Amino acid sequence: MHPESHTPPSEIIILPSVLAADWSCMGDEVRRAEAAGARRLHLDVMDGAFVDNISFGPNMVKTIRGVTDLYLDTHLMIHRADHYLQRFIDAGTHNITVHVEAHYDTSLAETLGRIRAAGLQCGLALNPATPLDAALPYLHQIDLLLVMTVVPGFGGQSFMEKETMPKLAAARDYRDTHGLHFHLQVDGGIYPDTAGIAARHGANLLVCGTSSFGPPDMTAALHELATAARSPA
Ligand code: DX5
Ligand code: ZN
């Protein structure tokens, strides 16, 4: 198990999303994130079917794993994640997050079970339009719940506060009243101002694409994001 796997859900962590990195020098970009103090990297896999974009697959995950020991958090925006699962497990990722809205050859519950049985952590993601109810049957078998704060598919979109913050707060309350311990992740449109809003509604894992890889000084950017997320309203 990666040491990061033991971090409690009370701890704020900023996850740079390599979707916003300069792919002409991906290895250097990963090392830049590492040098800037990142503890986890977020890897966005898109299949052109579940979402309207195509990014990369298990070979890129393996390539990134080859240049860093950082905890890799892989977000599968794909149908049939169960069919492709073993390839992502073999690529060396530490977490795999799958979507509740996606199609499965087997089932979502079985897919989550297989991720954990392989010794990885697992996450479940909800699109902005999907109610928390859809996730309730699975909350006992996940390490993180990802409340998407944009419609997935592209970086650089605007944070959907009204559509997603009540759901995030409800997920936090449900977790805390049911003795569960999953992390709460947000993804999409996270900048210092929205990082603060999301953290106050319960998020502790903040995925940041444009706001982390965009600025020339990533150390300062990550520090600003974490400070905003840790400061009270
Ligand atoms: C969106 C992806 C995000 C994306 C976020 O579909 O899941 O992880 O990288 O990008 P920003 O932070 O630029 O909104
Ligand atoms: Zn993502």
Image (tube, rainbow, N blue to C red):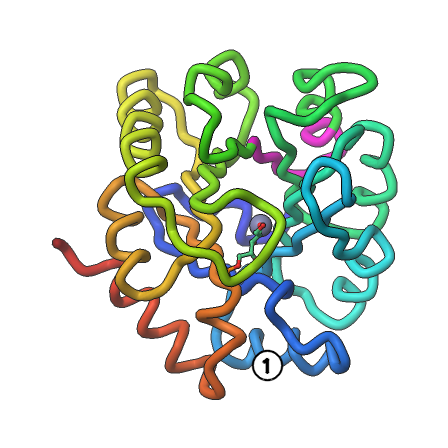
Give the quarter of the image for residue 99: top right
Residue 228: percent from the left, percent from the top?
A: 25, 64
Instruction: Report the residue at 73% width, 75% height from top.
Output: 23
Quarter of the picture holding the C terminus: bottom left
Instruction: Report the residue at 14% width, 55% height from top.
Output: 232
Instruction: Report the residue at 50% width, 62% height from top.
Output: 156
Give the quarter of the image for residue 30: bottom right
The vertical placement of 165 against 219, above or below, is above
Give the quarter of the image for residue 27: bottom right
Q: Which element carries disc 1, helix, strand or loop?
A: helix
- Residue that label 1 marks: 32
Check if residue 118 falls in the magenta segment: yes
Instruction: Report the residue at 83% width, 18% height from top.
Output: 105
The vertical placement of 18 against 101, above or below, is below
Q: Is residue 17 left or right of residue 30?
A: left
Q: Farthest residue toward the top?
A: 137
Q: Is residue 216 left or right of residue 91?
A: left
Magenta range = 115-124
Residue 205: percent from the left, percent from the top?
A: 43, 50
